Amino acid sequence: MKKQLLFIFLSMLLAACQSANEQGKSSVEKELEQIGLLNVADEIYGIDVYMVYATPYNFMGRVLYKDLDEAYLVPEAMEKLRKANELLRKKRLDLHLVVYDAARPRSIQQQMWEVVENTELQDFVANPNKSGGGPHNYGVAVDVTLVDCTGHPIPMGSEYDYFGDRSRVDLETQLLEDGEINLRELKNRQLLREIMTEAGWLVEPSEWWHFNAMSLTEASQKLTVIK
């Protein structure tokens, strides 16, 4: 009888927690789950999530994600991120991943594009009017970096969302030669790329922090854009 009562109590407690969690979700987060996206924090143990665009500390200088402070990905991308997290734990127990951005509504992408369109910065923001949007708008892209055991990002040669040559992966050899980044920063970038690509992610040449679970062409053929 005691075991039965304990089981009933635990079941009720679990249901209450699930209900509270559901009530705490915004309408945008509920919509993302309804179309099949998964919450990174719920799915992967030991990974940090800090949604930069849910704060004013981004290149736009204001909060863009007013109803989204959780990272969401399609299941295929989630499995690749899970694998990357496991690979990192095997290589470096003193480091872990932090997600700065993941699924992004195209309406937010449009706001970003309007700021950079026809400027020298437009190469760093996907045009939402092409292929239905960028990889973030399909939930197949993630912005990540590595943080140490104190929670501080390790040096990568530029800040997240720095729109300039120091962010570029395809210029790293020249950046090192010119002293724009140092050897430690380059090795940190290489470690991040190593675990991400080994897990199946594709590198974005213009941004060391940005990785795609599939090409934009494949995403636009298989998935629905997030409005």
Image (cartoon, grey):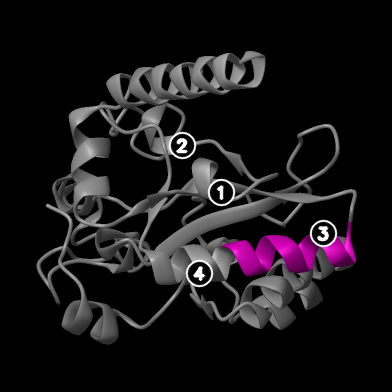
**Label 4: which secondary element:** strand
Between 215 and 181, the one lying in front of the other is 215
In terms of sequence position, does the residue under pointer 3 or pointer 4 come before the other?
3
How packed mark 2 is, by other alpha carbons closer than 10 Å (few <14, some 14-19, many 20 or more), is many
Between 124 and 2, the one lying in front of the other is 2
Q: Name the residue under label 1.
A: 160
In terms of sequence position, does the residue under pointer 1 or pointer 2 come before the other?
2
Image quarter for residue 139?
A: bottom left
Alpha carbon distance from label 1 to label 2: 9 Å
Which span is picked out in magenta?
82-92
Q: Is 125 on the left-hand or right-hand side of 166?
A: left
Percent across and percent down for residue 185 are 80, 61
Percent across and percent down for residue 24 are 33, 20
Q: Name the residue under label 4.
A: 211
* Amino acid at dot 4: Phe
Alpha carbon distance from label 2 to label 3: 24 Å
Question: Which of labels 1 and 3 is toward the front?
Answer: 3
How packed mark 4 is, by other alpha carbons closer than 10 Å (few <14, some 14-19, many 20 or more), is many
Question: Is the Cβ of the residue at disc 1 closer than 8 Å to that at disc 2?
Answer: yes
In terms of sequence position, does the residue under pointer 2 or pointer 3 come before the other?
2
Q: Mark 3 points at which residue?
A: 89
Alpha carbon distance from label 1 to label 3: 23 Å
Task: Residue 180: give its label.
Answer: none
- Image point (86%, 38%), residue name: 149
Question: Is the Cβ of the residue at disc 4 closer than 8 Å to that at disc 2?
Answer: no
**Label 3: which secondary element:** helix
Percent across and percent down for residue 79 are 52, 68
* Amino acid at dot 1: Tyr
Between 221 and 10, the one lying in front of the other is 10
